[in-house]
Amino acid sequence: MVEFVERRTKLTVGPIHRPPFLTKTQICVIVALITISTPILIKTILKGETLLHDRRVWLSGAVFVYFFSVAGTMHNIIKEVPLFVRDHEDESKVVLFYEGPDHQLGAEGFAIGFLYTVVGLLLACKS
């Protein structure tokens, strides 16, 4: 930036003072927090009470991955599929579903992903 300004204006820019990312006070507070929390963290890890030991977290993560897999989210991201488009006849309305097999919008993928997820969860609860 300095080189650009000097080149454009033909003026010399003095030294730029850049403060450190963390001040000494911030570093002291961070070290104190780490020192205080370390025994508590070790205790909870040894007792098995962390989020990694909670099966509800793993279940939520699995359902999250399943939903975005069956919704085709990666396809929508890669192909830059819009979530919806404006109606050509009435600009105040939006189109969420195209008629025909050639096009798909992101809202359609999320709707189908939601339905697949509901059916999958119902089948999982049944067995």
Image: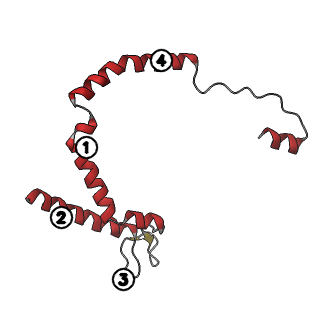
Residue that mark 4 sits on: 29
Give the Cα distance between marks 2 and 3: 24 Å
Left or right relative to 61: residue 30: right
The earlier-in-sequence mark between 2 and 3 is: 3
Label number found at residue 101: 3
Give the Cα distance between marks 3 and 1: 37 Å
What's the residue type where badge 4 is placed?
Val
Q: Is residue 83 at all visible to an observer of this figure?
A: no
Give the Cα distance between marks 2 and 1: 21 Å
What's the residue type where badge 2 is placed?
Val
Give the Cα distance between marks 3 and 4: 60 Å
Residue that mark 2 sits on: 119
The earlier-in-sequence mark between 2 and 1 is: 1
Estimate how packed mark 1 is, as few (under 14), some (14 to 19) or many (20 or more) residues with alpha carbons within 10 Å: few
Give the Cα distance between marks 4 and 2: 50 Å
Question: Looking at the picture, how far across and down is residue 107, in whole percent?
Answer: 36, 66
Residue that mark 1 sits on: 57
Q: Is residue 21 above or below residue 127?
A: above
The earlier-in-sequence mark between 3 and 4 is: 4
Q: Is residue 111 above or below residue 125?
A: below
What's the residue type where badge 3 is placed?
Pro
In this rendering, the label closer to the viewer, 3 or 1: 1
In this rendering, the label closer to the viewer, 3 or 4: 4
Give the Cα distance between marks 1 and 4: 31 Å
Left or right relative to 84: residue 21: right
**CB of mark 2 within 8 Å of CB of mark 1?**
no
